[in-house]
Amino acid sequence: MQQIVKLSEKLGKDESTMDSMVSPLPSEFQNPKWILKNIKGENTVVFVAETNGKIVGYSLGWISQPWSYKAKRGYICDCFVEKSHRRQGIGKALVKAMLEWFKDKGVECVEADIYSKNIPSLALFKGLGFKEVSKRLRLTFKR
């Protein structure tokens, strides 16, 4: 759990470099209690990639049915690989494992939010068949 928390904190720092609205400081989502509470149950899953006894990547996802959706949706919340282990197929393996899990659970579509600046992740997901369906727009007021 502690290794996943550390990776989750690194993910938060990476996201803060792509999005000025994301704090580089750990949030409640990196708290072990929050993670444990939210990964229990049949509709949530965490996959880890391990090298020499050390977790070097993880993915976290869950099944939900948003009010406007006609079927169950899989959502990939996190997918992170240590910088020193990237470009080795680990992220792809984590996402593929999650996709198989979603299929086995009867999910009809899977979604993930990817930052526009995260070109490697965009390429990974598009390479696995994901298509862009919306864009999030933001106006930030200068203070």
Image (cartoon, rainbow, N blue to C red):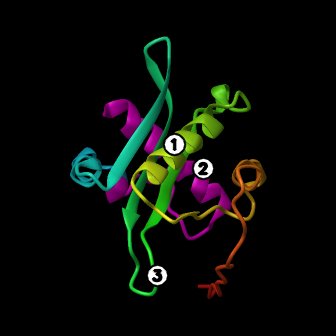
Q: Considering depth in this image, is 35 or 62 the residue closer to the camera?
A: 62
Q: Amino acid at mark 3?
A: Tyr
Q: In this view of the protein, which residue sits in the foreground, 40 or 24?
A: 40
The span shown in magenta is 1-29
Q: In the figure, 26 relative to 67: above or below?
A: above
Task: Name the residue rendered at 72%, 48% in the picture.
Answer: 124
Specify few, some or many for label 3: CA neighbours under 10 Å numbering under 14, 14-19, or 20 or more.
few
Mark 3 or mark 2, which has the lower sequence index? Answer: 2
Was residue 27 drawn as part of the magenta stretch in this picture? Answer: yes
The 10 Å Cα crowd at callout 2, few under 14, some 14 to 19, many 20 or more, is: some
Q: Position of residue 29 (x, y in %)?
A: 35, 56
> Is residue 73 found inside the magenta-colored segment of the image?
no
Frontmost of labels 3 and 2 is: 3
Residue assigned mark 3: 69
Circle nearer the viewer, 3 or 1: 3
SS state under label 2: helix
Circle 1: is it few (<14), some (14-19), or many (20+) Cα within 10 Å? many
Q: Is residue 114 left or right of residue 31?
A: right
